[in-house]
Image (cartoon, rainbow, N blue to C red):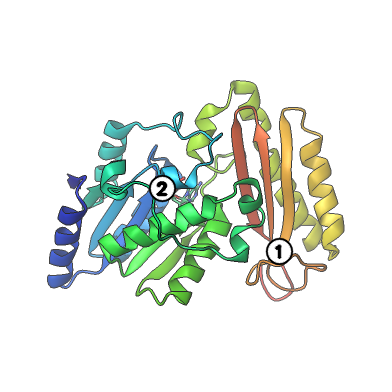
Amino acid sequence: MDVTGSAATLRAACDAARAHGHTVGFVPTMGAIHRGHARLLRQARHECGFVVASIFVNPLQFGATEDLAAYPRPIERDTAEAERLGCDLLFVPDEKEMYPNGPHTITVDPGPLGDCLEGASRPEHFRGVLTVVAKLFGMVGPSRAYFGEKDAQQLALVRRMAAELNLPVTVVPVPTVREPDGLALSSRNAYLSPDERQAAPVLFEALSDAAERVREGERDADVLRAEMARRIGAEPLARLDYVAIVDDETWEDVKRVERPARALAAARVGPARLIDNLLLPWDGGE
Ligand code: AMP
């Protein structure tokens, strides 16, 4: 595996791979690689001739009071892990390489979906995400780019960006990887104390409970939302941020679960802000 911090070297390597007839697959990350990232990389390896991963903790997507400085950066372990997972080229730019002229004047506007849910709690977050993803797409030129369903709103926005800006890339969704007790893997789980770690699966439990209620016939989304909020609110170590049930295509709040809908939850557990989501079962599919 080659490692570079240079966008020019990255572009040359991707051009060469394409010239050899390889499909270029791309897995953007912020590092602290875990089994969630590994699933993305494995799928890319399976489907593409040339696999590029990036590690960049993008300051543009962090709010002033967020954990940019504290975000884990175990670069040596990450490099070994990316190599073990079959990555061909690891791109590890510094801030100067990504933003040589300082703050951008041109950014990607996420539109209304960027302002709700995660966007309401983290203003400007998705503008930062889409701007860096657009830049990385420009540098790598991937045919396929892999994003986790764990960050469902991010995945939806990247898909919309690719579609609406006619970017020649297929955005590939990858299912969420979880701990045995249901907690979705996240680099931020490292912030949890043992007690907080025990409390953290409450998000998944609330989402799973909503799915179970739908399976048993409940269709009223307000009932499901209230029950999810009650469940998370009952955990003393969790501070609820939001619960939501949205149409899986439009991302609008639904009244009744009668077509594919997604339940989402966000809460602060100790120093960590955790998010999770689950596609609800519906008549005509699971
Ligand atoms: P991050 O490093 O947190 O920016 O994540 C990089 C990519 O990995 C994103 O597409 C995430 O959605 C994805 N990802 C993070 N955690 C998981 C997980 N538990 N399961 C599947 N994908 C994940």
Q: Position of residue 86 (x, y in %)?
A: 25, 50
Position of 54 with respect to 32 (left or right) is left
Q: Position of residue 88 (x, y in %)?
A: 21, 53
Residue depicted at 19% across the width and 49% down the height: 6
Q: Amino acid at mark 1?
A: Val
Position of 110 with respect to 167 (left or right) is right
Instruction: Determine which quarter of the picture holds residue 234.
Output: top right
Q: Which residue is mark 2?
A: 37
Circle 2 packing at 10 Å, graded few (<14), some (14-19), many (20+), is many
Badge 2 vs badge 1, beta-carbon distance below 8 Å:
no
**Quarter containing the C terminus:** bottom right
Q: Is residue 37 visible?
A: yes
Q: Which residue is mark 1?
A: 246
Instruction: Check mark 2 vs ligand 1: CB closer than 8 Å? yes or no.
Output: yes
Q: Position of residue 226 (x, y in %)?
A: 85, 50
Instruction: Determine which quarter of the picture holds residue 268.
Output: top right
Q: CA distance from mark 2 to mark 1?
A: 26 Å
Q: Amino acid at mark 2?
A: His
Residue depicted at 30% across the width and 49% down the height: 101
Circle 1 packing at 10 Å, graded few (<14), some (14-19), many (20+), is many
Instruction: Determine which quarter of the picture holds residue 181.
Output: top right
Q: Nearer the viewer, mark 2 or mark 1?
A: 1
Give the answer, above or below, for where 220 lies relative to 122.
below
Q: Which label's residue is closer to the chain start, 2 or 1?
A: 2
Residue depicted at 82% across the width and 55% down the height: 224
Q: Is residue 92 visible?
A: no
Give the answer, above or below, for where 198 lies relative to 174.
above
Instruction: Check mark 1 vs ligand 1: CB closer than 8 Å? yes or no.
Output: no
Position of 211 with respect to 87 (left or right) is right
